[in-house]
Image (spheres, coloured by chain):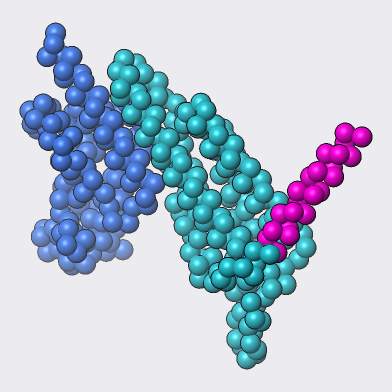
Chain colours: A cyan, B blue
Amino acid sequence: MTQIIVSVAIGSLLLGIAVYWFLQADASPKVHLSDAREALGCLQSTFLPVSVVDRVLDYNDFVFVRRQKEPGILRTLETERRAIAMYWVRHTRQQMRLLMSFYVKSARRSSGLSAALELKLALNYLVFLAACNAFLGLIWLRGPFHAQKVARRTRTVAARFCAVSEKVVALTESRAELREASGQQWPAG
Amino acid sequence: MELSAAVEDLKKHTLVSLRGEIARLIYLASTRDYNTGKYHHDGLALRFTQEIANQAIGKCHEEVFRRVAETPLEDLVSQLQEYITGEYREDEVIAAWLKLEPYRVVIPLTCDPLSAKLFCSNLMIALAILESRAKNRAKN
C-alpha cells in the first residue's frame, strides 16, 4: 500500500513538473541557440571545473585557520567560503535553467529529439535541482567545509546534464543548417 | 611558435629572477596598461613583436595567477610572508594591503569570476593571519 502511495506521489510530482514546464514554454520569451551555446560554454569553463570548487570547500584550509586560534579569522573564512559556494551554486543553477529553457522553448520543437533524450534531460535536471537544494541546505546548516561530497555530486549531475545538452544544441544547430540550406522557415516558437 | 618562444624567454630571463609566485604575479600585472588591458615589455617586444610580447605576458600572467589562486591557504600565507619580508617592512605592507587591497588589480582580464572571488578572499584571510601573527609577536 505504502509503495503504491509513494509511486502515485512521485508520478503526480513528475506530471506536475511536466505540466508546469509545458505552461512555462509559452509564457516567457524564446531562448536563442547562441544563448544556449554561451551558457554551455560558461558552465564547462567556469562553473564545472573540479579544481576551483574543490579549493573553495577545502577542509584543510579550515583546519589551518582553526590552528591559528583566531575565532574572528575563522568566522571570516567560513563566511567568505559560504558566499563563494553560494555564488557558485546560484550561477550554475542559472545557466542550467537557461539551458533547460532553451530545450523546452526552442530545441524541442525544432530538433525532433528522441523520447529517451528528453527523459534523460528532464531526469538529470530534476536530480540537479535536488542536489543544489541539498548543497545549499548543507552549507547553511554545517558550513561550507562539510559540503564537499554534495558539491561533487551536484557537479557530476550538472556535467551529465551538460553532456546531454551538448547533443541537443548540436542537433538543433545541424537541423537549423539543414533548414537554411533547403530554404525552409524555422517553425514558429 | 613565436609565442611559445616568447613565453620561454620571459620565464628564463625575467620571471626566474623573481622570488616566489606572488612577486611574479605582481610583476606581470604591473606590466599591464590598466586603460587598455595590454601588457608592455620593451625587451620582449624588441626580440619579438609588441603583439607577441603582449600575448606572452598575458599567458604567463594567467598561469601564475591560476597557481596562486589554487594554492592552499597555508602555503599562500607562507608565500605572502616570504614576499613581504624579503622586500619591505612587514607591518607597513600588511597595513597598506589591508587598506588598499592592491591584490584586486593583479587579476588577469580573462579570469573567471569564481577564481577571482576565491583569490581575493584567500589574500584577505592570509593578510589577516599575518597581521595577527605580527601583533602576537609584538605583544611577546
Whether B63 is drawn above or below A171: the answer is: above
The x, y position of residue B50, in whole percent, is 17, 66
Report the front residue among B19 and B48: B19
Whether A3 is drawn above or below A8: the answer is: above
The x, y position of residue B99, in whole percent, is 15, 37
Report the front residue among B21 and A4: A4
Asked whether, in this view, residue A136 is left or right of residue B21, the answer is right
Split into 4 quadrants, where in the image is the N terminus of chain B? bottom left
Quadrant in which residue A103 is drawn: bottom right
Split into 4 quadrants, where in the image is the C terminus of chain B? top left
The x, y position of residue B127, in whole percent, is 22, 30
Asked whether, in this view, residue A13 is left or right of residue A60, the answer is right
Whether B41 is drawn above or below A146: the answer is: below
Instruction: Magenta stretch: give its range.
Output: A1-22
User: Is residue B113 in view from this perspective?
Assistant: yes
Report the front residue among B29 and A7: A7
* Residue positioned 17% across, 62% down in the render: B35
User: Is residue B44 in view from this perspective?
Assistant: no
Q: Which residue lies furthest to the bottom in this view?
A: A183
* Residue positioned 15% across, 54% down in the render: B31
Q: Does the magenta stretch include residue B101?
A: no
* Residue positioned 29% across, 18% down in the render: A70
Asked whether, in this view, residue B136 is left or right of residue A74, the answer is left
Q: Is the magenta stretch mostly helix, strand or loop?
A: helix
Q: Which residue lies furthest to the right in this view?
A: A1
Q: Is residue A12 magenta?
A: yes
The x, y position of residue A129, in whole percent, is 61, 46
Whether A135 is drawn above or below A182: the answer is: above
* Residue positioned 44% across, 51% down in the render: A46
